[in-house]
Image (spheres, grey):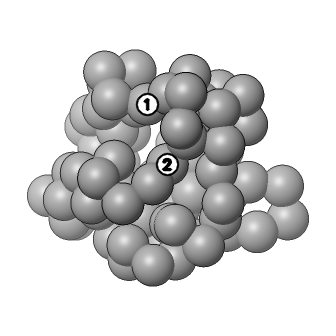
Amino acid sequence: MKQFEYVITDPVGIHARPAGLLVKEAKQHESKIMVRKGDKSADATRMMSVMGLGVKCGDTLTVTVEGADEDAAAEAMQAFFQANL
């Protein structure tokens, strides 16, 4: 299992467009990818779950990646967050 934390820097947080991009990126990997904010967590391949976290600018997310391609998936997800959120 791989895990990393990321502080959201996008001024509007995670809304429909970045949530859709996040889901698209997560679906490219075999591993199960979970996003957690506080005590709430969401499957990164489910857009409504991700949006349901209510992520705002400045929030810290914990991303957990577990599965066959977890090393590559965690690296790709971390790069996605840095580039888009």
Pointers 1 and 2 in contact (C-beta within 8 Å): yes
Residue at image point 72% right, 28% down:
58
The image position of residue 6, as x and y in percent, is 60, 29
Please state the horizontal and vertical placement of residue 59, each as a whole percent of the image.
73, 37
Residue 85 located left or right of residue 7? left
Q: Amino acid at mark 1?
A: Leu
45 or 52: nearer the viewer: 52
In the picture, the disc for residue 85 is: 1
Q: Which residue is located at x 65 percent, y 65 percent?
A: 53
Nearer to me, 3 or 6: 6
Specify the quadrant of the image occupied by residue 13. top right
- Res 78 visible: no
Q: Which residue is mark 2?
A: 14
Residue at x-position 52% and y-position 77%: 49
Task: Give the Cα separation between the discs numbered 1 and 2.
Answer: 8 Å
Relative to 55, say whether 81 is above or below: above
Q: From the viewer's perspective, is residue 40 above or below residue 59?
A: below
Rendering coords of residue 23 (x, y %): 29, 62
Q: Residue at x 57, y 57 (%)?
A: 35
Seen from the viewer's position, the closer of residues 84 and 61 is: 84
Callout 2: 10 Å neighbours few (<14), some, many (20+)? many
Q: Is residue 79 visible?
A: yes
Q: Amino acid at mark 2?
A: Ile
Near-viewer residue (48 or 42): 48
